[in-house]
Image (spheres, rainbow, N blue to C red):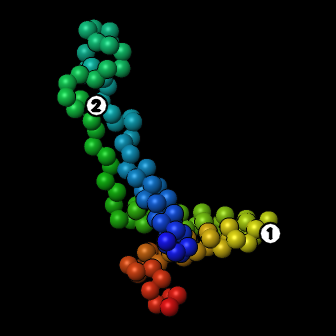
């Protein structure tokens, strides 16, 4: 695998994980265990009753929310790259800048990051 592919995989995995985390269920909207019965009445503490009783649908992000997450990931990489540069650590700074550039290409609508840019 080429070094550029490893960078792309790392950046995309990290960003997809951030998006996946944002889709997590808001715990304040999860129904209480036991189906609304008075606490302690015929239940085991914290147990959910019935098939799928504890299942809650994940959030669905709007396109703008997803774009905001990707932009945040780009900004975090650029900030970290600057910090590495100030510390005299050029290789990690270059790696982070390459990841930021790759993610920015997706934001710009280029579905083939690097096509035409590095050729």
**For this view, does 94 lie left or right of residue 58?**
right
Q: Residues within 10 Å of mark 1 (few under 14, many from 20)?
A: few
Foreground of the two, 116 or 4 = 4
Residue drawn at x 33%, y 49% is 59
Label at residue 54: 2
Residue drawn at x 67%, y 64% is 80
Label at residue 23: none
Give the number of the mark in front: 1 or 2.
Answer: 1
Q: Quadrant of residue 107?
A: bottom left
**Residue 76: x percent and y percent?**
60, 63
Q: Residues within 10 Å of mark 2 (few under 14, many from 20)?
A: some
Q: Is residue 116 above or below residue 7?
A: below
**Residue 55: x percent and y percent?**
27, 35
Name the residue that disc number 1 marks. 88
**For this view, does 29 lie left or right of residue 77?**
left
Regarding residue 40, the answer to whether it shows in the image is yes
Verify CB contact (< 8 Å) between mark 1 and mark 2.
Answer: no
**Residue 47: x percent and y percent?**
31, 20
Residue drawn at x 79%, y 65% is 87
Foreground of the two, 38 or 90 = 90
Of all residues shown, which one is farthest toward the left?
51
Who comes first in sequence, dot 1 or dot 2? 2
**For this view, does 5 lie left or right of residue 98?**
left
Residue drawn at x 25%, y 15% is 37
* Helix, strand or loop under label 2: loop
* Helix, strand or loop under label 1: loop
Q: Quadrant of residue 63?
A: bottom left
Of all residues shown, which one is farthest toward the top?
41
Give the number of marks: 2
């Amino acid at each position: 695998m080429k070094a550029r592919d490893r960078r792309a995989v790392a950046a995309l995995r990290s960003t997809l994980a951030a998006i996946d985390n944002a889709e997590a269920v808001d715990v304040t909207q999860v129904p209480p265990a036991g189906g609304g019965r008075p606490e302690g009445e015929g239940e085991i503490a914290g147990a959910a009753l019935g098939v799928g009783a504890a299942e809650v649908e994940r959030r669905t992000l709007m396109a703008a929310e997803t774009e905001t997450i990707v932009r945040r990931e780009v900004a975090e990489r650029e900030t970290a790259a600057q910090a590495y540069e100030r510390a005299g650590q050029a290789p990690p700074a270059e790696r982070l800048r390459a990841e930021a550039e790759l993610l920015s290409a997706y934001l710009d609508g280029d579905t083939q990051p690097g096509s035409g840019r590095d050729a």
